[in-house]
Amino acid sequence: MRILAVDHGEKRIGLALSDPTATIASPLKVIQHVSRIVDAAQVADIAAQNDVGLIVVGQSYDEDGNPNPAGRRAGRFADVLRNQTNIPIEMWDESHSTQIARAARIELGVSRKKRAGHQDEFAAVVILQSYLEARRASEQ
């Protein structure tokens, strides 16, 4: 089963897709934010085109474990997305995914010029890979 991860941001939405065995996460694309309904419709369409069986939406939390403002926006986006598709949707802690994605690209030796810009789709990869690894660990 393929899994789609969503890194929901105010300006852009990063997407990552797993392989059919739900083992490896790969960057898929970045969608420019238009409105919650339009964004959700685009994500639902992309999920359908890729035979996705589960959508994981990254949600960030504050130090008390409650969704922070960005996490609440991601939650509202997930609610709208649920109205656009019958594919199950899970929320997943995405805290620090952008920083982790940036650090990983530095470690891989990606040049500063190629690292410039936005990390949205790579943050979605971090979200999805952490979800896949946690799922595998719970199955063992």
Image (cartoon, rainbow, N blue to C red):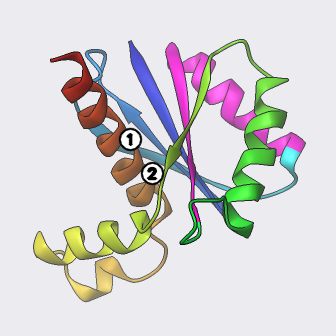
Is-magenta flag for residue 108?
no
Q: Give the percent coordinates (x, y) of residue 126.
A: 34, 53
Q: Quadrant of the C terminus?
A: top left
Q: Residue furthest bottom?
A: 112
Q: Which numbered circle lies on residue 118?
A: none
Q: Residue at position x 46%, y 63% from top?
A: 95
* Label pair 1/2, CB-CB below 8 angstroms: yes
Label 1 to label 2, Cα distance in Å?
6 Å
Give the quarter of the image for residue 105: bottom left
Can residue 41 be seen at all in this image of the molecule?
Answer: no
Q: Tag 1: Cα neighbours inside 10 Å, few (<14), some, or many (≥20)?
A: many
- The residue under the point 56% across, 60% down is 65
The residue beneath circle 1 is 128
Which segment is the magenta one?
Answer: 37-61
Q: Nearer the viewer, residue 140 or 42?
A: 140
| Badge 1 element | helix
Q: Label 2: state its secondary structure.
A: helix
Residue receiving disc 2: 124
Quarter of the picture holding the N terminus: top left
Q: Quadrant of residue 83?
A: top right
Q: Residue at x 40, y 19 (%)?
A: 2
Q: 36 or 97, which is in the foreground? A: 97
Classify 114 as above or below 126. below
Residue 124: x and y in percent read: 45, 51
The amino acid at mark 2 is Ala
Whether 56 is among the magenta residues is yes
Percent coordinates x, y for residue 113 in the rendering? 30, 86
Residue 128: x, y in percent? Answer: 38, 41
Up/down of 89 relative to 39, above or below: above
